[in-house]
Image (cartoon, rainbow, N blue to C red):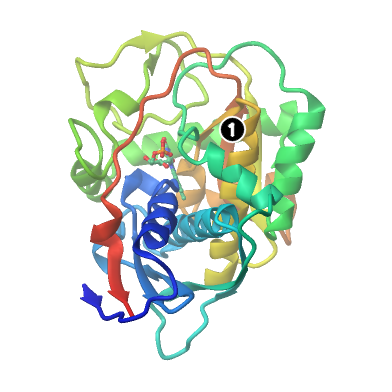
Amino acid sequence: MVIQHDNPLLSHDEVGILLSAAATAPSMHNTQPWRFEVTGSVVDVLLDEDRTLPAEDPSGRMTRIGLGAAAFNLRVSAAMLGYDTTLAIDPDPDRPDIAVRIFLGARHPSRNSPLGALYSQLRRRRTYRGPLATTDVPSTVLDQITSAARCEGGELRWLDAAARYKLGQTLQAADVLELHDEDRLTERGRWVGGDRAHEGVPSAALGPLPTKPAAVRDLSAGYADPARDSAAFETDPLIAVLTTAVDDQVGWTRAGMALQHSLLIATSYDVVVSFLNQAIEYSALRPQVQDLVGHGAWPQLVLRAGYPAESAAETPRRSWHDTLDVWQ
Ligand SMILES: Cc1cc2nc3c(=O)[nH]c(=O)nc-3n(C[C@H](O)[C@H](O)[C@H](O)COP(=O)(O)O)c2cc1C
């Protein structure tokens, strides 16, 4: 880490608040693929090449989504501290490792903003992999979750029953591919299962195994774990596909921001979400998901939503000190 600051614009506490908030973002397999550089009042979110998933995410799409989510959290925590923010995606052609640059503007310490209010949801949000309760989510709540994604340039498309049925078949095909994908299973061993102190998905967060086939992704990919219970899952959950208009690094970063904004709004209504991304990760199956949402819309994530029937386990994070590369 390079630290040179005789007269820093941000205090040590403020940098800690911003980076700790960023770290609560979701990331595939909880790799936390981010590093940060703070220069005056500019915070850069950078890709950490040592935390990518070459087998499961060869294009880097999922990694970028994680970076977008972390950047959104930075904006939320900056707003909670009273700062105005603006941002640029891929701001410097000479530094392609910088995914998002966030500019902190004037500070209004006593201002309450809707963005800053989401700060209270950051540590309440968790990926939920258990069964859902049967209570319906009101349409007014779904509308707010959908609007939150739209604010960041994403679109949440809630699937009707026929589309959910077709998606179920695609998910089953993806699960079969995954069970025989040695490279993926090996990579997963690095990040998933067991006890985890700072990164990865511990066994306790994998959720129960479904007693019958269900719309839930088992990250253990078939490996038996005696610590896991089994449970009956709902038969037909709410499912949305998060899409963007473009399918490049900028689109993926926007998808991450849209994801995180909608997850924080969902959390504020106690609605939980899990990810059914296996069908998007296989390029041979992704067109089947695209058929469900219409061409011109690029599917980035598949989300299952509802009220939880159980509590969700916490996943660990690295200390913010370990993610700060430069502060000057
Ligand atoms: C782009 C992306 C893809 C993900 N894909 C999956 C997935 O397919 N299955 C799953 O169970 N969780 C998935 N997750 C959730 C992560 O495993 C989770 O965010 C991480 O373990 C941290 O846990 P938390 O969300 O509870 O904080 C994904 C998260 C992101 C951001």
Residue at 23%, 64% in the rendered image:
50
Image location (x, y in percent) of residue 199: 25, 45
In the rendered image, the vertical position of residue 174 relative to residue 258, given as above or below: above
Q: Nearer the viewer, residue 200 or 244?
A: 200
Quadrant in the picture for residue 248? bottom right
Quadrant housing the C terminus: bottom left
Q: Residue furthest bottom?
A: 94
In the rendered image, the vertical position of residue 261 relative to residue 34, given as above or below: above
Q: Which residue is the site of mark 1? A: 267
- The secondary structure type at the circle numbered 1 is helix
Q: Is residue 1 left or right of residue 43?
A: left
Quadrant in the picture for residue 75? bottom right
Image location (x, y in percent) of residue 70: 46, 56
Image region (quadrant) for ligand 1: top left
Image location (x, y in percent) of residue 299: 61, 52
The reply to whether residue 290 is visible in this rendering is no
